[in-house]
Amino acid sequence: MLKFQISVHARDRDAAGLPVTFDEALAALERLDRLFIEPDGSFVWTGVTADGGAWQVDGNLIDRGDCLAYVELKGDCPEAQFNSLLAALGWPKAGLTFQLQKRGVFLDEIEFRRLAGTSNGAV
């Protein structure tokens, strides 16, 4: 289980944003089972783990017009579901970086996953 409060950005600092548009990300997220997304890009995704535990991710797509600027995510979920969420943002083809919102630091994917998998999570 991954626990996090982050924003997801393009890994390439020179990129204007993520490699998908707001509408493309919205459409991809709409296809995920048990995910409810509003037209403004705010969403909630819930599920149950194999052992019966509940998980939930709250998020918000931040539009830039020509691309998706970044995505805010808060909650916890199994790694497989997190991967599905990232796939809607162009991952793994596009590299991503993860900002810990409370600390203001950026982590690469390996660092983020290691920290998010701990009991304190990536917050």
Image (cartoon, rainbow, N blue to C red):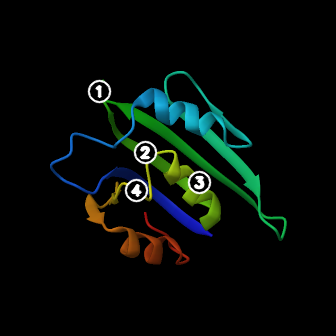
Mark 4 residue crowding within 10 angstroms, few (<14) / some (14–19) / many (20+): few
Residue type at mark 1: give it: Asp
Residue 21 on image: x %, y %: 39, 32
Q: Residue at x 42, y 30 (%)?
A: 22
Label 4 near label 3: C-beta < 8 Å?
no
Q: Nearer the viewer, mark 2 or mark 4?
A: 4
Q: Quadrant of residue 6?
A: bottom left
Marker count (numbered): 4
Mark 2 residue crowding within 10 angstroms, few (<14) / some (14–19) / many (20+): some
Residue type at mark 3: give it: Ser
Q: Which residue is mark 3?
A: 84
Say which mark, if any, is on residue 66. 1
Residue 99 on image: x %, y %: 32, 57
Residue type at mark 4: give it: Lys
Residue 57, above or below 53: above
Q: Which residue is mark 4?
A: 93
Q: Secondary structure at mark 2?
A: strand
